[in-house]
Image: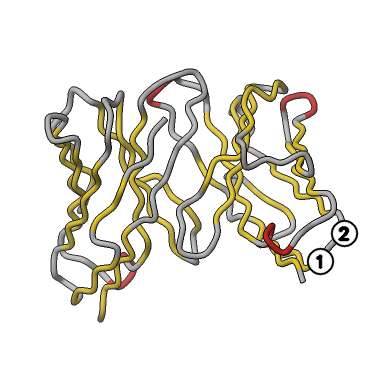
Amino acid sequence: SQQGEEDPQALSIQEGENATMNCSYKTSINNLQWYRQNSGRGLVHLILIRSNEREKHSGRLRVTLDTSKKSSSLLITASRAADTASYFCAPNSGGSNYKLTFGKGTLLTVNP
Amino acid sequence: DTGVSQDPRHKITKRGQNVTFRCDPISEHNRLYWYRQTLGQGPEFLTYFQNEAQLEKSRLLSDRFSAERPKGSFSTLEIQRTEQGDSAMYLCASSLGLGFTDTQYFGPGTRLTVL
């Protein structure tokens, strides 16, 4: 498996604004997953996008995947204070162990 | 709540002591993972079970670490002769085992502090 690299490392926005964070990886993938971690709920799976998909939506979340650029982005629309958390991407290259390899994440702060 | 549970949530120990953590996965999940997370970093993979078989161990898992999953249900992670560098959050996750699109569900973690 390989590690994703999230960018920016930190992002601070006002409630109601949109937040975009990016993930880059190095080799071909089977899928890419996004997770959120905050102190209250631990690490939570947000969305999985397969390598043959270009865009996926889940509520206020939109994930895009560009396999030619080896990058993905996570857009959170109409952010809320409760979205304050660290966001991690986990590119999955396949293989037999299915372990996830996380980067350092993007720390998103949504100010009320 | 039928999610992944971990016990204890916090553990403070003195250097050189042994500690054991427990993870109870979601009941129908046959895969179980242990990760370690230090401040400012993402979780790092430690080991993985498919039912009761431990199929992979990370280089991070020195011989002071041992994990078991008897009968393919709960799992324990033991650290012997703890060192200050072992201070971290230890996360457990489980999944159904659906192949590459498997979703891992994480527990709340056990925060270990070694004095």
Q: How packed is label 1: few (under 14 Cα within 10 Å), some, or many (20 or more)? A: some
> Image check: B107 left or right of A87?
right
> Image check: B23 left or right of A48?
right
Q: In the image, what residue occupies the spot 31% across and 41% down?
A: A47
Q: Give coordinates of residue B20: x percent, y percent.
A: 81, 50
Q: Secondary structure at mark 2?
A: loop
Discs 1, 2: same chain: yes
Residue that badge 1 annotates: B13
Q: CA distance from mark 1 to mark 2?
A: 7 Å
Q: In the image, what residue occupies the spot 71% across and 67% down?
A: B113
Q: Quadrant of residue B55?
A: top right
Q: In the image, what residue occupies the spot 67% across and 22% down?
A: B51
Q: In the image, what residue occupies the spot 80% across and 28% down?
A: B70
Q: Give coordinates of residue B15: x percent, y percent.
A: 82, 64
Q: Give coordinates of residue B18: x percent, y percent.
A: 86, 54
Q: How packed is label 2: few (under 14 Cα within 10 Å), some, or many (20 or more)? A: few
* Amino acid at pointer 1: Thr
| Whether label 1 touches label 2, CB < 8 Å | yes
Work out whether residue A101 or residue A32 is closer to the camera in this orientation and state it.
Answer: A101
Q: Give coordinates of residue B17: x percent, y percent.
A: 87, 59
* Amino acid at pointer 2: Gln
Give me the chain letter of mark 2: B
Q: Height in image: A112 above or below B104? A: below
